[in-house]
Amino acid sequence: MPSSRTTAVSATGSTARPRRFLLTRRNLLILAAAVAVLVAGYLTLAAGHASAAAVLLVVGYCILFPIGIAL
């Protein structure tokens, strides 16, 4: 009788290995900088400086987060 256990097989036919954490220290530092810039952007927005807040939020969301994920 066949075993009820199954092993995960990748597209290449080999058995799957356990996943490891793929973000390096550099990624985490860039993502931490993105969070810091976003917090500064929202605090600046709350203080009433909409133009400076917009710049900070765009840098955080559109530049730092994608770089932090991609590298």
Image (cartoon, helix red, strand yellow):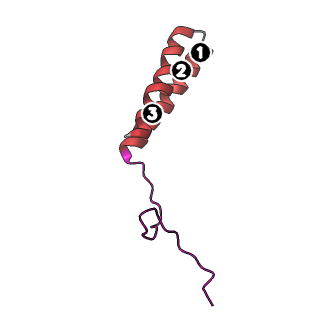
Point out residue 69 in the picture as x, y percentages from the top left corner: 44, 39
Please report the residue visible at 46 percent of the width from the left and 67 percent of the height from the top.
Answer: 16
Point out residue 14 in the picture as x, y percentages from the top left corner: 42, 70
Cα separation, mark 1 vs mark 2, equals 6 Å
Tag 1: amino acid: Leu
Point out residue 12 in the picture as x, y percentages from the top left corner: 41, 64
**Mark number for residue 65?**
none
Look at the image and give the residue range highlighted in magenta.
Answer: 1-25
Assign a secondary structure to mark 1.
helix
**Mark number for residue 66?**
3
Query: Is the C terminus in the top left, top right, bottom left or bottom right quadrant?
Result: top left
As for residue 10 lying within the magenta part, the answer is yes
Please report the residue visible at 42 percent of the width from the left and 52 percent of the height from the top.
Answer: 22
Magenta stretch mostly in which secondary structure? loop
Count of numbered labels shown in the rendering: 3
Residue 28 versus residue 20 in the image, above or below: above
Please report the residue visible at 40 percent of the width from the left and 34 percent of the height from the top.
Answer: 67
- The answer to whether marks 2 and 3 mark residues whose Cβ atoms lie closer than 8 Å is no
Q: Which residue is mark 2?
A: 41
Assign a secondary structure to mark 2.
helix
Residue 13 versus residue 65 in the image, above or below: below
Q: Which residue is mark 1?
A: 45
